[in-house]
Structures are given as structure tokens and as C-alpha cells.
Image (tube, rainbow, N blue to C red):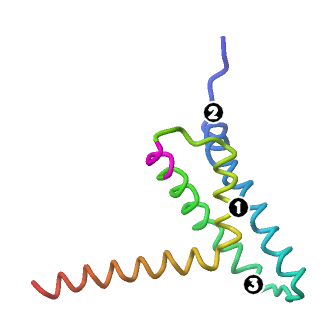
Amino acid sequence: MSEPISIFGAAGAKYGPTMAGMAIGTAAKYGLALSEGRRLTWRGVVADLLLLGMLGLLAIAISDAAARIIGVSVGTDYRVLVGSLAAVGSDRLVRLARDHFLKRVDAELGQIAAR
């Protein structure tokens, strides 16, 4: 008889690879910054840590949407890749998400004002 699956085990199986990818991508981002001679500040590190939650949600949404488009289930390697790419390109990804959100809000407000 098999053991019942706990909610933490199921969540770890689904979101663990994305979190691992985020850690790898963040380390790569800081490694690149150090190799280029840029100084890391506490303020920048704290800002990146605060953004990781939203980046994780975006990485999961991107990998799930890609899985629906191509019609196959998402493997753990793919989730690690998407998570690490989201963390490495966090500046651009957050800016893109913010701009898309603001454009959509402006369009919705324009429709409401036109009524």
C-alpha cells in the first residue's frame, strides 16, 4: 500500500524545480554582475529577493502556457530552465509585465470613459 501524498510533497514536486531555477538564475545574475566589475548593494539584493515571488509566478505561468500550446506536460528540466531565465532577465521581465499591465488598464479605462 502506498503512502498518501502530502500537500507539501505535491507542491514541492510542482514548484520545486521553478524555485531551483530561480536560485540558479539569481546566482548567475549576481555572478555576471561581479565578473563585469559591478558592485552589489544591499538595496539591490533586497529588491531582487522581493521580486522573486512575482518572477516565480510568471515563470510558472509561462511554462504552463507553453505546455498548453505544444500539448505536452511540462517536465522538471523545462521548469528549471524557465525559472532560471526569468531570474536572469528579471529586470526586463518585470518591466515588460508592468508595461503590459498599464497598457491594459489604460485600454479598460478608455472603454469605460467612452461609455
SS assignment at label 2: loop
Q: Nearer the viewer, mark 3 or mark 2?
A: 3
Image quadrant holding the N terminus, namely top right
Q: Nearer the viewer, mark 2 or mark 1?
A: 1
Task: Residue at 84%, 85% (x, y): give it.
Answer: 40
Q: Relative to the observer, which residue lies in front, 12 or 32? A: 32
Q: Which residue is mark 3?
A: 44
Q: Amino acid at mark 2?
A: Ser
Sequence-first tag of 1 and 3 = 3
* Mark 1 burial class by Cα count in 10 Å: few <14, some 14-19, many 20+: many
* Mark 3 burial class by Cα count in 10 Å: few <14, some 14-19, many 20+: few
In this picture, which residue range is highlighted in magenta? 66-70
* Mark 2 burial class by Cα count in 10 Å: few <14, some 14-19, many 20+: few
Q: Position of residue 77 (x, y in %)?
A: 69, 46
Residue 84: numbered disc? 1
Q: Nearer the viewer, mark 1 or mark 3?
A: 1
